[in-house]
Amino acid sequence: MIPTEDASARKREIEEKLKQEQETLSFIRENLEKSDQLTKGMVSILSSFESRLMQLENSIIPVHKQTENLQRLQENVDKTLSCMDHVISYYHVAKDTDRIIREGPTGRLDEYLACIAKIQKAVEYFQDNNPDSPELNTVKARFEKGKELLEAEFRSLLTRYSKPVPPILILDVITVDEELEVQEEVVLEHLPESVLQDIICIAGWLVEYGRNQDFMNVYFQIRSNQLDRSIKGLKDHFRKNSASSGILYSPAVQTKRKDTPTKKAPKRPVYIPGTIRKAQNLLKQYSQHGLDGKKGGSNLTPLEGYDHDLRVKHLSDALTEKHGAASGKDDVLDIEIDSYIHCISAFVKLAQSEYALLTEIIPEHHQKKTFDSLIQEALDNLMLEGDNIVSAARRAIMRHDYSAVLTIFPILRHLKMYKSEFDSTLQGTAASTKNKLPTLITSMETIGAKALEEFADSIKNDPDKEYNMPKDGTVHELTSNAILFLQQLLDFHETAGAMLASQAEVSSSASSYTSEFNKRLLSTYICKVLGNLQLNLLSKSKVYEDPALSAIFLHNNYNYILKSLEKSELIQLVTVTQKKAEGLYRELIEQQIHMYESSWQKVTEHLTDRNMPVFQPGTKLKDKERQVIKDKFKGFNDGLEELCKIQKGWAIPDKEQRDFIRQAQKKVVSDAYRAFLQRCANISFTKNPEKYHKYRPEEVEEMIERLFDTSA
């Protein structure tokens, strides 16, 4: 049971809480009443505001619509006025642009093109809106006039600033400086940059707006003329300067250097003007005359080991006498050959430069055709000149002047060396254009191969003319001509091998185009020439009545051939197909030496014991026995004198061989003579021994020492 006091306290606590709640409820009611009053006031204000907005909207919207209509009308008026001004301006274009069009675009291209653009827009407007108006014809005429003046300006700029490239600059471009590891490229500037930009701009306009391609014809005609003049200028430069300056196959003009090289670049083959021509002179002149200017002489070219005193003077005199009149003509031909070689290189470089210029001016789809037309004149002139060289060589070969082929070698080698660049440069041109160089190369190879084959046949069939044989048994002109010709082939062995390969009947897929195959063909050819020469020399040697002179003749020729092969390194080509060639020639030389030595048997046979009387010391000889000894002495003396007299006029140009043969013969003869004298020392066979014992052994040796000495 809860105590009374606790209940009272609890009751009071509850009453107090109730009172507080009542007070809170009363406060909330008061706030709700105030909130209701405020809400009613706000609703009243908003209702009043809405009413006023509706009144304002009803008043403003009509004004706004009216203003908007007025603004639209204003804009339409402005646009109409602007269109009217624009349209009216088309009617004034002809008048506004008249002065600028009449004065032309020179010096004011941008302004001029802007005027043309205005005229073009006027033409388009009248065509679209009033095609029957007279103004259309006016602006059309003005546009055509403007286009004509642009075309004229294009032609004028090209004509005025297109100049032939100076020869010295061309030589700079085609120079190969062998000391430079990296070659500095020489850039050809055909047109000033500002002029080039104007030309590019005009060309672009003519293509895009002028609908005109005639300017491309103008371009290739002008640039074609300059290309041809550049090459002709290079030719004139060679005619004036090459003879004195000695310019080589690879021009000697130095380029500006950027880098310091660390090693040399690969060398290109070098053609020295005049070397082939001198060989041709020898081959031509000596096919008619000998060294001494008389029939039956020799055209021996002295080699190391040959006695210059015997032949060099004759050679010098012959060259001076016979070649002096023709030297001027030959020098001109040398210059022409060298000039042609340089012009081939120049054409490639200039054509490449022209194509680079053309690509900046001519539209892409017209570039190849325009370039083809541009290079035709210069290319045709070069090919015509090459055809003339081939024709001249063909006529010379018909006259049996096979040295003419030597002219073709340096040119053909250069053409083939540049063929890849030619093909690359002419890529995209017509087939007829691209085939011109291969056709010329084929012609040169064909005529060259024909000359080589006919030369080999001429060596075989050279007639055995008695009056044309060297009286002293020295080297025949046929031998020196053949060797000289082969030595020239050595300088162009790759070209000559390719010539022969071009005519060989082999499959196109075979190895006929390899260097090794060509080398073997050339080796076979050289061996053929040498074989024909050997057969002909053997036949010619039979012209001599004296077998000893015949042996000396063959010895000299075989020895000359061997020394020439060894000195000129022809032997290396020969051994490609004939491994034992050197040994075979040495055997032939030895055989002829033995044949010559047999001529002394008619002298030494008198010194043998044959028919020699047998006697005892102190025994008196019979008359018949004394006569035998007298006959032996007389036979020896007469034979010795006769041989020495005859053979002293014979020649062995090779000093080493001459000394060897002399020494060998001295030993054989003097040894036999000394032995004979010793056997006869104590024999009294005559009262006048000095009549028979005419020579001491030393004197016999001196007589033999004077053999083959034409100066004695």
Image: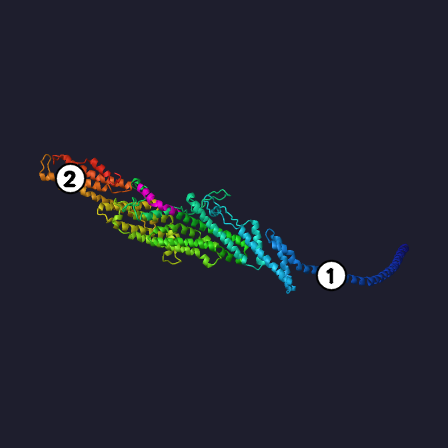
Q: Quadrant of the N terminus?
A: bottom right
User: In the displayed structure, would residue 705 be above or below residue 451?
Assistant: above
User: In the displayed structure, would residue 504 be above or below residue 671?
Assistant: below
Question: Which mark is drawn over residue 77?
Answer: 1
The Cα–Cα distance between marks 1 and 2, rounded to whole angstroms, is 150 Å
Asked whether 231 or 480 is in front, the reply is 231
Res 662 visible: yes
Q: Secondary structure at mark 2?
A: helix
Question: Looking at numbered disc 1 in the image, what kind of residue is underneath it?
Answer: Val
Question: Which mark is drawn over residue 502?
Answer: none
Give x and y (percent) for residue 359.
53, 54
Closer to us: mark 1 or mark 2? 1
Disc 1: CA contacts within 10 A as few (<14), some (14-19) or many (>=20): few
- Figure disc tally: 2
Give x and y (percent) for residue 33.
88, 59
In the figure, residue 567 lies in which quadrant?
top left
Magenta span: 313-331
Give x and y (percent) for residue 407.
38, 50
Residue at mark 2: 634
**Which residue extends farthest bottom?**
132
